[in-house]
Amino acid sequence: MSPLTAGVVGAVVGAAVGAAAVALSDEKNRKEIGKKFNEFKKDGQKVISDLKGKIEDVKSGAGDKIEEARKDLKKKL
């Protein structure tokens, strides 16, 4: 990475950190960010739970299909 690019990236990251520090210095902003974080966390947990349920459904359905195929094969033999 060139020194110029590194300098620009450093300045952008520094500005972002500075803006975040200013926003977090206000208690109202911290509480709002905390609420949003908790909402995202709950939403993420719900998505994961839904995905786990769907995966179990697919696994169960696949197991049933495999068993049906075994039975059909035994009948044909």
Image (cartoon, rainbow, N blue to C red):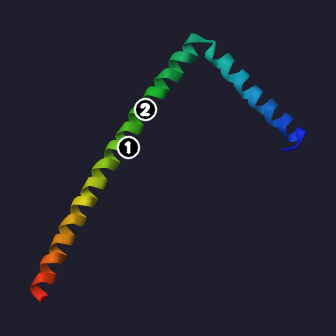
Quadrant for residue 15, please give it.
top right
Q: Which residue is mark 2?
A: 41
Q: Amino acid at mark 1?
A: Val
In the displayed structure, does residue 62 sit left or right of residue 38?
left
Is 20 rendered above or below residue 63?
above
Instruction: Say how many tags the image has.
Output: 2
Q: Amino acid at mark 2?
A: Lys
Q: SS of the residue at dot 1?
A: helix
Quarter the N terminus occupies: top right
Front residue of 48 and 31: 48
Q: SS of the residue at dot 2?
A: helix
Circle 1/circle 2 CB separation < 8 Å: no
Quadrant for residue 13, please give it.
top right
Residue closest to the far bottom: 77
Cα distance, mark 1 to mark 2? 10 Å
Q: Which mark is residue 15?
A: none
Q: Which residue is mark 1?
A: 47
Q: Residue at x 70, y 24 (%)?
A: 17
Residue closest to the far front: 77
The spot of residue 4 in percent (x, y) is 90, 39
Q: Circle 1: is it few (<14), some (14-19), or many (20+) Cα within 10 Å?
A: few
In the displayed structure, does residue 6 sit left or right of residue 57?
right
| Mark closest to the chain's N terminus, 1 or 2 | 2
Quadrant for residue 77, please give it.
bottom left
Q: Residue at x 31, y 54 (%)?
A: 55
Q: Residue at x 12, y 77 (%)?
A: 71
In the displayed structure, does residue 22 sit left or right of residue 66?
right
Q: Residue at x 39, y 33 (%)?
A: 42
The spot of residue 54 in percent (x, y) is 30, 53
Q: Circle 2: is it few (<14), some (14-19), or many (20+) Cα within 10 Å?
A: few
